Amino acid sequence: MWIKRMPNDYYEKTSFCSGSVLLWQNGNIYVMDNHLSAAWCWLQSCDPEKKYNFMHIDRHYDMLDCFYDEDLQPLRDDPHMPYEDYLNLKRTKDVGDEGPVFKWDNYIMAAYNLQPDWFHTNIFFTQKEGSPECGWGHRPLPIKEENTLYMDFYINQYIGEPEDILSEFQEDDYKLPWIVNLDLDVFYTKMYLINNYFPTSIFVILPRS
């Protein structure tokens, strides 16, 4: 179903760093044009009483934390707020133009501050663009990075047939469901396509059977 319907003139639209053109949902799968929407999706579909592992597949780290704790209070009070209200959240401190809380590169750290139990084992497939360090003094998010060239193998290793002997897992964390966060630009460099197939851009929760 459409949460934010794609307009007929979508090809003339751009969301840039803090906007949104479309958001679509089918069960626990969400498709969006701007990754900033992911945190809202997780808040709708993930159980605040459960623990999850996190897999980030993206050209960039998306680990900026350009927000204050106070900026997230409306989501602590109402994690299921309407999507448009989420998009319209503004910074609470003086930042000149009182810009939006969520941008395309800070939603992971915001979600981690809201629900740290959703980020136990954190696997990143990136092209090492941007910084893996959040930088603003918020709680660091421990990550392990894997080479994108071996993505199929590692996805199967971590999610398809998890092994408790893998050093990245703590105790029974290998049994937890996964939040999988995919950005299409991981398959591109600045010059060319680095894989021979075109995947679907998704956020999905993969439960354990």
Image (spheres, rainbow, N blue to C red):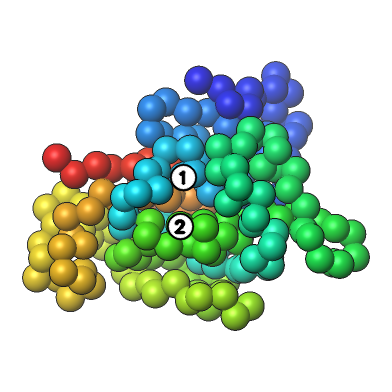
Whole-angstrom CA distance, mark 1 to mark 2, is: 10 Å
Numbered label attached to residue 42: 1
Q: Which residue is mark 2?
A: 115
Could you tell me which residue is drawn at 28 percent across and 42 percent down?
A: 206
**Which residue sits at x=62%, y=37%?**
81
* Sequence-first disc among 1 and 2: 1
Q: Dividing the picture into quarters, in which one does residue 32 lie?
A: top right
Rendered position, 172 above or below 128: above
Badge 2 local density, few (<14 within 10 Å), some, or many (20+)?
some
Query: Can I make out residue 59 in this image?
Result: no
Residue 174 in the image: state x and y as whole percent.
18, 60
Position of residue 112 measured from the top left corner of the image (x, y, whole percent): 48, 62
The answer, for residue 25, to whether it is visible in the render is yes
Q: Is residue 156 above or below residue 205?
A: below
**Kind of residue indicated by mark 2:** Gln
Q: Secondary structure at mark 1?
A: helix
Residue 170 position within the rendered picture, expressed as x and y whole percent measured from the top left: 20, 71
7 is higher (above) or lower (below) than 36: above
- Amino acid carrying label 1: it is Trp
In this picture, residue 119 sits left or right of residue 166: right
